[in-house]
Image (cartoon, rainbow, N blue to C red):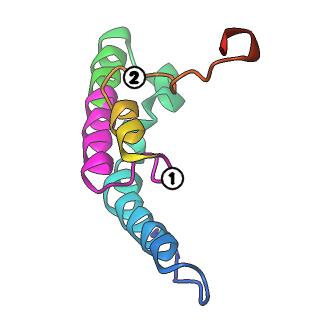
Amino acid sequence: MAINVTPIPGLDPTVNDVRMRTAALVDTEILPHEDELFVSRRAGELDADERERARHRSIERREAIKVKVNEAGLWAPTFPRSTAAWASTPGCCALPTVPTRSTRS
């Protein structure tokens, strides 16, 4: 089942573009692979070896999707490009820290 997204009249064309490209990417790269991506939902049905193989396939699929999202310019589309590129680095798990009051000069 595809995501039903249509342009919203009056919305900034750039925002509509991001919405449409995101929906297209979800339709082609995520929805067809949900069973593989979310194999943990049925982990109880698999033996230990099957679970491990499925986990590795899921990780590989997720990494491939990250690359495609980044290539499409959809990784953190509201962040400055330098931050979005950093955030899509494999292994990245947190956004840059913002200095707190006590560490600001």
Q: Are marks 1 and 2 in contact (CB under 8 Å)?
A: no
Measure how far apart labels 1 and 2 are at the Cα level: 18 Å
- Residue 69 is left or right of residue 99, and the answer is left
* Amino acid type, callout 2: Cys
Residue 102 falls in which quadrant of the image? top right
- Residue 101 is left or right of residue 65, and the answer is right
**Where residue 86 sits: x, y (%)?**
35, 31
Helix, strand or loop status at disc 2? loop
Residue 2 lies, with reference to residue 93, above or below; the image says: below
Q: Which mark is residue 22?
A: none
Q: Which residues are magenta?
A: 58-79
* Amino acid type, callout 1: Thr
* Outermost residue, front side: 105
Q: Which residue is rendered at x = 46% and y = 22% of the image? A: 93
Front-lying residue, 80 or 15:
80
Check disc 2 and report the residue beneath it.
92
Q: Which residue is rendered at x = 46% and y = 73% of the image? A: 14
* Outermost residue, right side: 101
Residue 73 falls in which quadrant of the image? bottom left
Majority secondary structure in the magenta region: helix
Check disc 1 and report the residue beneath it.
78
Q: Which residue is rendered at x = 54% and y = 78% of the image? A: 12
Front-lying residue, 99 or 40:
99
The disc, 1 or 2, on the residue closer to the chain's N-terminal end is 1
Residue 96 lies, with reference to residue 47, above or below; the image says: below
Front-lying residue, 38 or 66:
66
